[in-house]
Image (cartoon, rainbow, N blue to C red):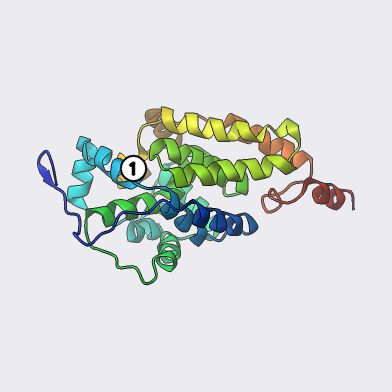
Amino acid sequence: MVAQDLEIVVHPDRKRSKFRPLKAWRHMQKLIQNKEDTEQVFHIIEALNGRSFEKNFAAFVASPEGRRLLKERTYLPPILDDHSWIRKLPEGTVGRAYVEFMEREGLTAQGLVEESAKHRAGVPDYDDDYLWFGNRLRDTHDLFHVLSGYNRDALGEASLLAFTYSQNPGNGVLFIAFMGCRTIAKNAPKAARIMDCFWEGKRNGAAAQKIMRQDIVALMKEPLEEARARLGIKPPVAYRHALQVLTAHGYTATTQLEDAGKIREQAAA
């Protein structure tokens, strides 16, 4: 495969993902039970995405930025996990916001690599351009959090995946985003307007430039608000409203998926 001046390498033994909705449903139930069980996300995406990955890759290498990044083949986790150089950046930069987010949440880029490896256990990892692209999708997830303004609560994760869907379309990501918001909406006060967060995430992701095509090291050095403005990332107004309503009704980041009646009982105790 050739994309203009770039020869694309795809291992001949690599198999296309099959569409397996029942498998996706089983793993979705596990994810609802424990939103921190990141391994389930990879299973769902694999079960539903079909040819979306190939289409996203083709769009990526059709862009000058994508071809340049593929030629460089930078592996992001060691760069993102080396907080020493990032801490030297001025306050208010994307990098400083990223480090603060990762340390506050107890996360590392390598940690996501390890969760991905659990899902891929026993499956060969072909060292080709699809592997590099898939790694980049995975390794930029937490940077998406920082840039989009969505936190790691259940609603924030679901809304971010709606944003991500518009950036890199795939039925698996869309399914998780919709089901996550729908599950929260069933239990939440109607005033929270939870499903608005899903639609807002999709709109904001569609309106923004492709984050995957950015020079990540250069992006880390930009002031956060200037980077958001340059990329066209709009503030998550519906999400912030929903959080205010949920908080007022006694919900926390860890109880958004629980039954509303139980939350009211806890708040009254």
Report if residue 82 is visible in the image. yes
Residue at 22% across, 53% down? 129
x and y, in percent, of residue 83 in the image: 41, 58
Residue at 59% across, 34% down? 197
Read off the residue under disc 1: 212
- Badge 1 density bin: few <14, some 14–19, many ≥20, Cα 10 Å: many
Question: In the image, is residue 70 above or below residue 63?
Answer: below
Left or right, 54 with reference to 182: left
Residue at 36% across, 72% down? 122
Identify the amino acid type marked 1: Met
Q: Toward the viewer: 73 or 176?
A: 176
Q: How many marks?
A: 1
Report if residue 88 is visible in the image. no
| Residue at the limit of the structure toward the bottom, as seen here | 122
x and y, in percent, of residue 117 in the image: 40, 66
Question: In the image, is residue 120 above or below residue 154?
Answer: below
x and y, in percent, of residue 126 in the image: 25, 63
Q: Toward the viewer: 108 or 218?
A: 108
